Structures are given as C-alpha cells and as structure tokens.
Image (cartoon, rainbow, N blue to C red):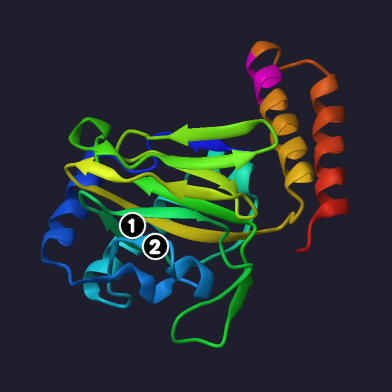
Amino acid sequence: MVVQVPKVLREAQVARCHELMERAKWVDGRVTAGHQSAKAKHNLQIAEGTPEAREMGDMIMAALERNPLFISAALPLRVLPPLFNRYEPGMNFGAHVDNAIRQVTGTPFRLRTDLSTTLFLTPPDDYDGGELEVEDTYGTHAVKLPAGDLVLYPATSLHRVTPVTRGARVASFFWIQSMVRDDGQRALLFDFDMAINQMNHAAPDHPGIVALTSCYHNLLRRWADA
C-alpha cells in the first residue's frame, strides 16, 4: 500500500526547515546505510543529533501526531527520529530494500521497519529527476510530491531514487513500526476506516456506522501487536 499524506507541514514550516538546512552540517549519506545499500547510495545527509536535525525532527513528529490520515494509514507504534537527505545533480539511490531492524542512535532501542516514509521538502519544479520509485504487486509507482507532502510505503518494497539532473532534492525520511505488521491487514483496515469516514459525512445518523466501527476496532484488536 502506497499512501500520500498531503500538507503534513505548512508552508512556513517548510521554509523554517530550509533555514535550518542552510546552516546544517551535511555528511556522506552512507553513514546510515546497511552493507548492501551503501553500494547504491549516493547522497548527503544532515548529521544526526545536531540542533538543526532535532528541531526539524520535533516539528515533523508533532505534525504527524495531529494528522488523522497518517495515523489511519500507518497505525504507528514507534517512529524512528526523522533523518534528512539531499540529492544534488548526479546523485541517486539505486534499487534497495530497507533494513528490517533499525536501532535508535545513541540508545539500546530497536524497532522493526514496517513502513518507510519520505517527506518532501523541495517543490517539484525546483529540480529534475529525483523521483522516488516504489515497486509492488501492481508495478512501479513514481512519486514526486509538493513540499510538505509525505508518502508512506511498505519497507519490504524494492525502491530507488532516480538521478537528480537539475537543482537539489531535499527530504526527510524515517521508518515506522506499525501496530499491525502485515501490510495486507493494514491496507484493509485503512480502506475500512476511509469508508466509515465517508459514511459519517454522507449519513452521520445511519445505525450501520456503529456496527462498522465495531468491526473495525475488533479487527484492529485481533491484529495489533500493542
């Protein structure tokens, strides 16, 4: 399941991110790559733990907590602190699958990466190339979103970032351990929740809404890890 979540960050928040990134320390992006991914990864990242990274990460986490579409699609149990990358002309990230387990830097805590997330911070007209391409059962999805929009996709997916040929593409990326680890179950619950929301708008007093909501929560109770 590939889900776009629009307007996670407001325009002023995206502008603040760019201010912080202008003065941030950028390092080789391979510092957070696994052995196999490091062979395909050619980009820059903001050093972890810097004041700039912490401020932007806190901003994103607070925005996610207020976003009902993100909560419905991800059903998050744990979210790895956001990281930030930059692709300049000639940079790309070849086809790869993300590590199944990631450790929170500086802590003993680990999480299972059920979902991968990219939050775009550059308007698409400001750069050429740099599409996120995600493969699934139905083919390859090319994703290039407005600044402030986010895309969620299964971390099990083979994916890549195509070479940037003009401008610079900056984004935040991070991983989520969902309460529901199975992507098919999570997709079914998401569709179920969206349908209930549609019914609430179309016929808010319909007695079937209570029954459907009960079914949703009982399925979530059956499938959730937490």
* Rendered residue at 42%/56% (across/down): 173
Q: Relative to 117, say whether 107 is above or below.
A: below
**Residue 117, percent across and down?**
49, 51
Mark 2–mark 1 CB contact (< 8 Å): no
Tag shown at residue 41:
2
Tag shown at residue 12:
none
**Residue 85, percent across and down?**
31, 59
Callout 1 amino acid: Met
Mark 2 or mark 1: whose residue is earlier in sequence: 2
**Residue 105, percent across and down?**
45, 81
Among the 4 quarters of the image, the one containing residue 48 = bottom left
Tag shown at residue 59:
1
Q: Relative to 128, say whether 104 is above or below.
A: below
Callout 2 amino acid: Lys
Disc 1 is placed on an element classified as helix
Disc 2 is placed on an element classified as strand
Q: Which secondary structure dominates the residues rendered in magenta?
A: helix
Horizontal relation, residue 183 to residue 169: left or right? right
Of 73 and 145, which appears nearest the observer?
145
Tag nearer the camera, 2 or 1: 2
Q: Residues within 10 Å of mark 1 (few under 14, many from 20)?
A: some
- Give the residues in magenta: 197-201
The quarter of the image holding the C terminus is: bottom right
